Image: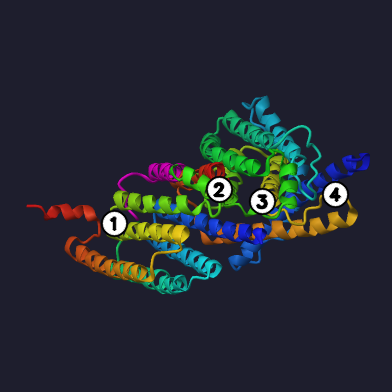
Amino acid sequence: MSLTSNIVLPILQLIVIVGLAPLVKGFINKIEARFQCRRGPSIFQPYYNLIKLLRKDAVVSETASWIFRATPYVAFVSILIIALLVPVLSSCVPLNFTGDVILIIYLFALGRFFLALSSLDTASAFGGMGGSREMMISSMAEPAMMLSVFTVSLAAGSTNLGNITSAFLDSSTLLLNPSLFLAFAALCIVIIAETGRIPIDNPHTHLELTMIHEGMVLEFSGRYLALIEWASSMKLLILLTILVNTFLPWGAASGLTFSGLIISFALYVVKIGFFAFLIVILESSFAKLRLFRIPNLLGTAFILSVLAIISLYVVG
Amino acid sequence: MTEQVIVSSRTIDILAVLMLMMTIVLVGTSRLRTSIWAYAIRSFLLTWVSGLIAYFSGIHHIFIATGISLALKVIVIPGFLFYIVNKTKVKTEVESVINYTLSLLISCGLILIAYYSMQSIIKFENAFMGHCLPVSLAITLLGFFVMIIRKKAITQILGLLAMEDGLFFAALSTSYGMPLIVELGVFFDILVSVIIMGIYVYRIKETFDSIDTDSLRELKE
């Protein structure tokens, strides 16, 4: 990569991920409201919320330690680093030399770990409950995510997301592997679990007994809350990006030409919009699962990913 | 030409894997209606596969088998099962002897056994439609497993149908199906057995006020 692309690509990628993440959230909320015959808030409402929260003072509990203050920054920055590790518009990745998909999984885990710690830190009852539930879910979702991602890496011959995308772009029959279908199905379930969407967790609820992610962040306010909300919407967009650019990479630019980037951006928006629409349909047609039914669903994801990797190993 | 062969064999493989996923749904779901839908979708995928194989191989009697299987397995049998569920007004929750997570793990083990035991044959066959044989064995084993662990009579019928699907798929993918007369016999057998079992379900419901097959033990002196 030349010097200009070294500068231009990370900036473009950060603008897309950081800037568009609240829009995706607003889009999902708006369409979901339409599905329920409501007019719904404006599609830009998440931006207004962020601006309002950033202007407000943060209230911190007297018993909270430095972990509580550090958590929003850790969560936000870990997601920012991931944003530079995934291929977004082109198959070149800005931080290609530092890490691969395993680092991405661990960075997600780092943010989640600090959120769980901070939820225990203020000693509020809801925080501890939310934290323990989140850890339970992630302990089941993470193996499934790792195995399905490893299946993709084995099929493409690299653990680097950029290399995976370009490998699938080069060969048209490589993606027609049945094992990748299993991995795709597993990854879809995992993404719903990781982002706390409806069959697992309801992102709109603040009812004490059912909240998982919202329970963890209940004590945060002001700019801390803004950072955490922003990070969680970025997490949704990044996971969708990983899904889109590994399994449906068509149109992603392989070089850094202006016209190629425009085309790949348009296709990227269409693909992300499609998956956001699927999430809306899923959320509108299912009720939230009971907490003790969640292992059932995530167990299915785990089995699908195990099958994916084994069938790839046996059949090829 | 070889490109086309790769694409068509990969398409059949993908449909086979989707059939396997529908069988996993049958093991993992707790709803009766979902499991009947899973059966209908799997039968539809099987019909699709047999249509594709008939088209690629050009053997006429597979077309006939495809048509019969479309009418029987996709429309008549699921419709009849839905009719039974509505008629007996059973609780729509599936009851199982062991819990769902454990049964999912065991079924994962069964599928692994299927893949590993077929490994040597797949290597021998040059990976053309390599997923078909393990998947058909896995569906047969899972059907057997569902018959063992589920308590309700209707889920046991679904297990039997899964076994039949697995055997039909194995015959279809390895040797382009059995002779037509054998297949007609099997289809007729399946239809009759499902109807007889449906009537049994209705009688069990009338006698014991549930379709739990465990209560059949009360018949003892």
Residue B21 seen: yes
- Dot 4 corresponds to which residue? A255
Residue B97 lies in the magenta-colored region: yes
What residue is rendered at 70% in x and 46% in y?
A: A238
Q: Do labels 2 and 4 share a chain?
A: yes
Say left or right for A308 vs B211. right
Q: What whole-number distance in Å separates the C-alpha atoms at marks 3 and 2?
A: 19 Å
Neighbours of disc 2 within 10 Å: few (<14), some (14-19), many (20+): many
Residue sticking out furthest to the front: B124
**Residue at mark 3:** A174
Q: Which residue is drawn at 49% across and 70% down?
A: B59
Q: Dividing the image into 4 quarters, which one contains the N terminus of chain B?
A: bottom right
Residue topped by disc 2: A186
Residue type indicated by callout 2: Ala
Q: In the image, what residue type sits under mark 4?
A: Gly
In this rendering, the count of numbered labels is 4
Whole-number angstrom distance, CA of label 2 to CA of label 4: 31 Å
- Chain containing the residue with disc 1: B
Q: Helix, strand or loop at disc 3?
A: helix
Expressed as whole percent of the image width and height from the top left, the position of residue B39 reads: 41, 62
Q: Is the magenta stretch mostly helix, strand or loop?
A: helix
Tell me the SS state at disc 1. Answer: loop
| Numbered label attached to residue A40 | none
Magenta-drawn segment: B94-116
Seen at 53% across and 59% down, the residue is B15
Q: Name the residue under label 1.
A: B152
Sequence-first disc among 2 and 4: 2
Q: Which of B92 and A210 is in front in this view?
A: B92
**Discs 1 and 2 lie in a common subunit:** no
Q: Which amino acid does label 3 sit on?
A: Leu
Disc 3 is attached to a residue of which chain? Answer: A
Question: Which mark lies nearer to you, 4 or 1?
Answer: 4
